[in-house]
Image (cartoon, rainbow, N blue to C red):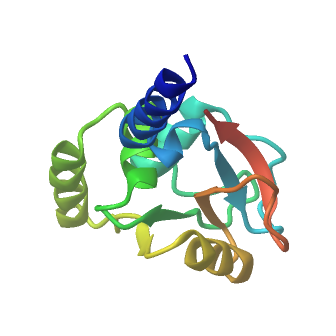
Amino acid sequence: MRRLAFPYLLAVLVTWVSIGAPAHAEERLLIIANPAVPVAEMDVNELNRIFMLKRQVWPDGSPVVPVNREASSEERKRFSEKVLGRSMRSLAKYWNQMQFKGFMPPVVQESDEAVTAFVRHVEGAIGYVVAEHPPEGVQVLGEIQ
C-alpha cells in the first residue's frame, strides 16, 4: 500500500501544478481613482461609459482621464470582457474611430504600479489594478471579480 501512495501523490501534484487555474483567476481588479475625483463609488455601467469615452467630465466639471493596462495584459483582457463587453480587436477599432472624432483613447500604462502612480499624480485619473489591498495614495471606487 505504501508503494502506491507516493506515485499517486506525485501524479496528483504534477497534475495540480500543470492544470492549476491561472494566477489571475481569483484576483480582483480594484477600480482606483485620483483622490481629487469627486465620486465615492463607481458601478460597471458608469465605468463602461468612461472607458468608452462617453463620459468626459466628472460631476464637478473636471476632465476624466481613463487609464488602461497594455493590450497584452491579462488584466486588460478581463477588464475589457467584464466591463466593456467587447473584444480587444473591437475596442481598438472603436478607439481609432473615436480618435478621428477628436476623442483621445485611454492612457496606457505597463504595470499595476505604473497605473497606480499615474492615477495618484494625475487629477481626474481612473484606472484598475490587481491588488489584495488598496494601493496608497488613491481612492478605491469599487472592484470587479
Residue 82's quadrant in the figure? top left
- Residue sitting at 76 percent across and 52 percent down? 132
- Residue 5 % position (x, y): 53, 24
| The N terminus, quarter of image | top right
Is residue 144 shown above or below 133?
A: above
The residue drawn where x is 70% and y is 56% is 131
**Residue drawn at point x = 20 percent, y = 55 percent:** 92
In the rendered image, the vertical position of residue 69 relative to residue 22, given as above or below: below
- In the image, 70 versus 8, the foreground residue is 8
Instruction: Reply above or below: 80 against 85.
Output: below
Question: What is the number of callouts on the image?
Answer: 0
Residue 134, percent from left and from top: 81, 58
53 vs 130, left or right, is: left
Task: Single out the residue that lies furthest toward the top.
Answer: 1
Q: Position of residue 104 (x, y in %)?
A: 35, 68
Asked if residue 53 shows in the view, the reply is no
Q: Quadrant of the C terminus?
A: top right
**87 displayed left or right of 32:** left
Residue depicted at 24% across the width and 39% down the height: 87
Q: Considering depth in this image, is 7 or 33 the residue closer to the camera?
A: 7
In the image, 25 versus 6, the foreground residue is 6
Is residue 124 shown above or below 122?
A: above
Q: Nearer the viewer, residue 144 or 125?
A: 144
